[in-house]
Image (cartoon, rainbow, N blue to C red):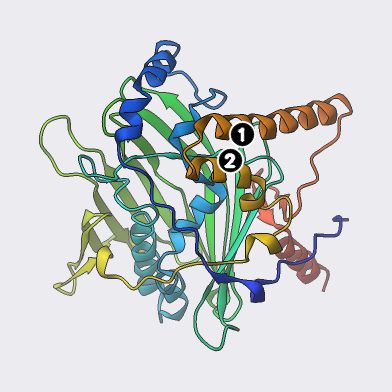
Amino acid sequence: MLEPPPLPVPHSDDEPDSATDEEPDLGSVEEHKSVILHLLQQLKLGMDLTRVVLPTFILEKRSLLERFADSMLHPDMFLRPADMPDPESRMVAVLEWYLTSFHAGRKNTFRPKKKGALAKKPYNPLIGETFHCSWNLGGGGENRLVYTAEQVSHHPPVTAFYLECPQKQVWLNSSIYTKSKFMGMSIGVNMVGRMQLHLMRHDEVYNMQLPSAYARSILTVPWVELGDKVTISCPKSRYSAAVVFHTKPFYGGRLHRVSAEVRNPASSVVCRVSGEWSGQLEFDYPALGVKKVLDVAQLPVTPKRVRPKQLQRPYESRRIWGAVTDALRSGDIGRATEEKRKLEDVQRCCEKYRKDRNLPFPVKYFVRDDEGGWIFRRTLEKDQADTMA
């Protein structure tokens, strides 16, 4: 029997997000270069950075829980597959959303040699921390897409998040943990875990992963690129998409290139994609002799909505990290470091207490599923009710 969940977050209180912090220019890197050099001297190639304490000045003034919500800068793209008439068009629509979900977030973090291009790191979420937001989709505020994220584990550091739009009968469940390693002048971050997009009207599930990310040129002008091979698959329709994020060669080449192929159940290619996930994407349908270009910079943007901080619960991201964020905004790195240390000390003490008494952490919104991942508990409760009916 599941424990009673916490009271639902009232998204009717959400307001247009006002936390639009622009990161400072690259002067901060030059100012603290000696700190970075000292840190690098203690690292070895391939070293796991999961438990390495990084300098506070590189923090981004928001939690990783909030960062994952950036994939919904274009919620209409996310929901469009539900309205497509056949499996092929739905797979292509899912791929379109997936490829356009990476350019969002802080501007210019993926453009090297450009003022303001400082690639910073979000806060590592504390276990039990949550973040909630929503996007209005018209219809007087009743038609909305809702996001719930929770840090469900500390070792490994697993983030679970859930998106739901009841009107479209679409939901996405994900549980991800990051594995970082030192690569000399770069830091590589592997996204371990899965995402599952459910189109309930069609009884379809789309399985997908996130690509690895790389923070490049960490001593000069840090910037981010993606690199990996991932697959999107739908077991019911047997359509699939193979996606390759190409890293830039040392000499020449373009930044942020991506290519993809969509195959039908007969393994024939029905659509090819090429271009840049940060710019223009060309979709080529060889059997039809048709091409179309999608410019991610021209897509309509729907900002997220968040409850005012004074209405948020004590364990929500902006409440938990409020003192650290205020100190970073005022440029007081020493105070930010001290406030961050206090939070982490409390987390360590609580972890030790639970370990000594063999007590599990009381996760609020998610439960483990049969495959070792985490699933939004209301979804599991519905599945159990359907099974008993």
Which residue lies at the image location 17% right of the left edge and 33% below the top edge? 249
* Percent position of residue 360, x then y: 82, 38
The residue where tag 2 is placed is: 324
Label 1 secondary element: helix
CB-based contact (under 8 Å), mark 1 and mark 2: yes
* Percent position of residue 187, x then y: 38, 28
Q: What residue type is labelled 1?
A: Lys
**In which quadrant will I find the C terminus?**
bottom right
Indicate whether 105 appears above or below 39. Answer: below
Which residue lies at the image location 56% right of the left edge and 45% below the top edge? 326
Which corner quadrant of the image does residue 261 belong to?
bottom left
* Percent position of residue 306, x then y: 58, 65
* Percent position of residue 345, x then y: 71, 28
Distance from Cα at disc 1 to Cα at disc 2: 6 Å
Which corner quadrant of the image does residue 190 belong to?
top left
Which residue lies at the image location 50% right of the left edge and 52% below the top edge? 68
Q: Which of 136 and 373 is in front in this view?
A: 136
Which corner quadrant of the image does residue 28 belong to?
top left
**In which quadrant will I find the N terminus?**
bottom right
Q: How many marks?
A: 2
| Mark 2, other Cα within 10 Å: few <14 / some 14–19 / many ≥20 | many
**Is residue 265 something one can see in this rendering?**
no
The residue where tag 1 is placed is: 340
Q: What residue type is labelled 2?
A: Val
Q: Which of 198 and 7 is in front in this view?
A: 7
Which residue lies at the image location 66% right of the left edge and 43% below the top edge? 372
| Mark 1, other Cα within 10 Å: few <14 / some 14–19 / many ≥20 | some
Indicate whether 193 appears above or below 314. Answer: above
